[in-house]
Amino acid sequence: MTTGTQLRPMAFVRDPVGDEDMARANHYALVSRLFHAAPDAALLDTLAASGDWPVDDDAPSAEAMLMARAWNALCAASSAMDAAAAQQEFDALFGGVGRPQVVPFASFHLAGFVNEKPLARLRDDLAALGLQRAAGESDPEDHIAALADVMRLLLTDTTRNEADRSAAQDRFFATHIEPWYGALIDALDAAPEANFYRCAGRYLRCFLDIEAAARQIEA
């Protein structure tokens, strides 16, 4: 699946990536794609055909059951949405002159304004990881789509061994995603124009809740 990557990937294969981490990377790739730009017809069709995640009351955790429901709801919303309507909704939520209905930047939710200190810290951390904003990309690096893409890259970075990959993911998630993703999704839930993206936000919340819970278990 094309992710709309906003950051430069790494190279030189050393350590293979396991199936679970590849699955997580695919979720992060989808998050990055959905929040970087409106879904096109091909992506909507793919999602519409994928809504068959079993909802099991005996799932290993409440988070897993909620994730299944959120995924199926996103896929059902995709089957009812066409690309033109998705673009219109995306523009209404995230575009426009001045502050949009929903602000997808970490600095806004953490500091009250875009381009604030959390962005400066993020840029330092990205530089330490060997990552930078892609040429021609105008959005600051603390956009949720870019942060999701960083997680995808960290999960699939075969230049690091498994332990180093895990440590890098944990640090990045704890610092740059976990403190504010709930506020972003609350804003999506409250936005009058949100329809498809309300479902996308709930899917995002369930996925990131699982990520946060797993990090706490491993700590």
Image (cartoon, rainbow, N blue to C red):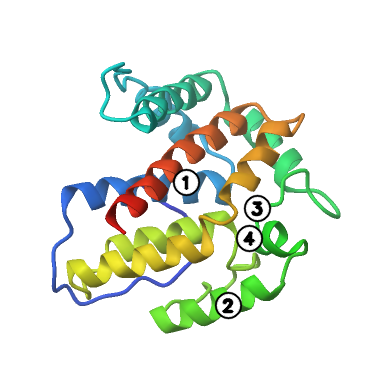
Between residue 128 and residue 95, name the one nearer to us: 128
Q: Measure how far apart labels 4 and 2 are at the Cα level.
A: 11 Å
Position of residue 20 in the picture relative to residue 195 (left or right): left
Label 3 sits on what residue type? Answer: Pro
Asked whether the residues under the numbered discs 2 and 3 touch, taking CB atoms below 8 Å apart as contact, a structural biologist would say no
Q: Residue at x 13, y 69 (%)?
A: 15
Residue linked to disc 4: 106
Q: Residue at x 56, y 57 (%)?
A: 179
Position of residue 192 in the picture relative to residue 206 (left or right): right
Asked whether the residues under the numbered discs 2 and 1 touch, taking CB atoms below 8 Å apart as contact, a structural biologist would say no
Element type where label 4 sits in the image: helix
Label 2 sits on what residue type? Answer: Arg
Element type where label 1 sits in the image: helix
Asked whether the residues under the numbered discs 3 and 1 touch, taking CB atoms below 8 Å apart as contact, a structural biologist would say no
Q: Residues within 10 Å of mark 3 (few under 14, many from 20)?
A: many
Residue 219 lies, in percent from the top left, at 31, 59
Residue linked to disc 2: 121
Establish if 148 lies above or below 56.
below
Residue linked to disc 3: 104
Q: Is residue 2 visible?
A: no
